[in-house]
Image (cartoon, grey):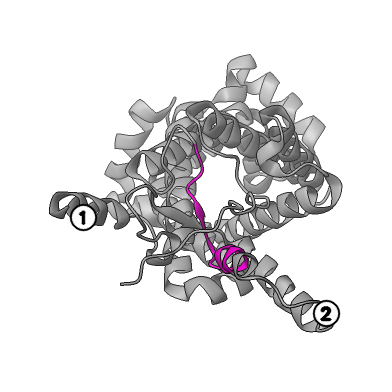
Amino acid sequence: MEKDSVKAGGRSAMIPSFLYSSSSSSLSKRLFDLDTLTRSTNLDRHDHGSSSSPSPSISSLSSTKATRSFVIPAPKEKVQMYSPEFYAACTAGGILSCGLTHTAVTPLDLVKCNMQIDPAKYKSISSGFGVLFRDQGVKGFFKGWVPTMLGYSMQGACKFGFYEFFKKYYSDIAGPEFAAKYKTLIYLAGSASAEFIADIALCPMEAVKVRVQTQPGFARGLSDGFPKFVKSEGTLGLYKGLVPLWGRQIPYTMMKFASFETIVEMLYKYAIPTPKDQCSKTLQLGAVQKLGWWGLFTRGLPLRIVMIGTLTGAQWGIYDAFKVFVGLPTTGGVSPPPAPAATVLATV
């Protein structure tokens, strides 16, 4: 018994204290469902509004108590939720989602950066691609792709991995009631904290990438560009653009994650009649694609719209596809309802 409790204590350190409970030997740890709190509140209102109904039996009272205990069995997935393997999977998914997508849109990023640095030469999107092709050929469209891939892979690892961590961490601090009531604030705080760390990882590669892409003759790529940059600017020079990077990325990431979580939840609530746990994996990932198109038509100037919309949709698609591949549920949406069977929680 003592060994079991030590093992449980080590594993529960990765999970908020209110997300699980100890019970009889036949029961495993249970994860708290934030949406259960909302459903419980609705049940309370219904009970108060129907005072004329007959008194409930003891069995129904115990069942209702179990339903309102805010504790449900852990999802039966291949990867234990909030375990080290869970965070490792989310980190790997972030590497794939950000690294691959940003590398794929390198030509768009290249033209965008040059339009900002040299507007006289790169006057528009179409002419920008033409100038780039005449000056550097087809290879020029992917100049700086190595620091792009490495930098945004590191950013994606921190962005998605730490988002899952901070979302759980802030929920633990807030407690069950406030975590459910202010879940959007938790999404915002978690994504902001994650992006703060992610940009520190991204900044050195971003600095080299921009210099390689916008300064003719500076370097051919990362291998010669990085040591040349450090030699001329110093190691701290790699972080000169960190504050502007925070100013650009943190608000974007906050809106990106909070919007995605909320929109997917609304899709499952209003547009998709089937509960999320009963939806096929293809249907769950379809919700991600819809958000990408939504983002595509609601952001910024033409080139920025195409680039960010494509990145956002593709990143969520890759990230959730990877989570499904390793045996995790997709991000966002309403969690499955609690098990109907009555359970008695052990008292401490």
Q: Amino acid at mark 1?
A: Ser
Quarter of the image where the C terminus is located: bottom left
Residue position marked by numbered label 1 in the rendering: 5
Q: Quadrant of residue 183?
A: bottom right
Which residue in the rendered view is the most extreme toward the top?
138
- Label 2 CA crowd tier, 10 Å (few <14, some 14–19, many 20+): few
In the picture shown, does residue 100 fall above or below 57? above
Q: Which residues are magenta?
A: 62-76
Spot occupied by residue 36 in the image (x, y as percentages of width and height) = 62, 63
Spot occupied by residue 252 in the image (x, y as percentages of width and height) = 63, 57
In the picture shown, does residue 175 fall above or below 88? below
In the picture shown, does residue 180 fall above or below 9? below
Which of the two marks, 2 or 1, is nearer to us in this view? 2
Q: Amino acid at mark 2?
A: Ser
Near-viewer residue (68 or 222):
68
| Residue 91 sits inside the magenta stretch | no
- Label 1 CA crowd tier, 10 Å (few <14, some 14–19, many 20+): few
Number of marks drawn: 2
Instruction: Report the Cα–Cα distance between label 2 and label 1.
Output: 44 Å
Which residue in the rendered view is the most extreme toward the left?
2
Q: Is residue 118 left or right of residue 242?
A: right
Circle on res. 50 = 2
Near-viewer residue (1 or 18):
1
Does the rendering let one see residue 190?
yes
* Residue under the image location 57 percent in, 69 percent down: 65
In the picture shown, does residue 243 fall above or below 260? below
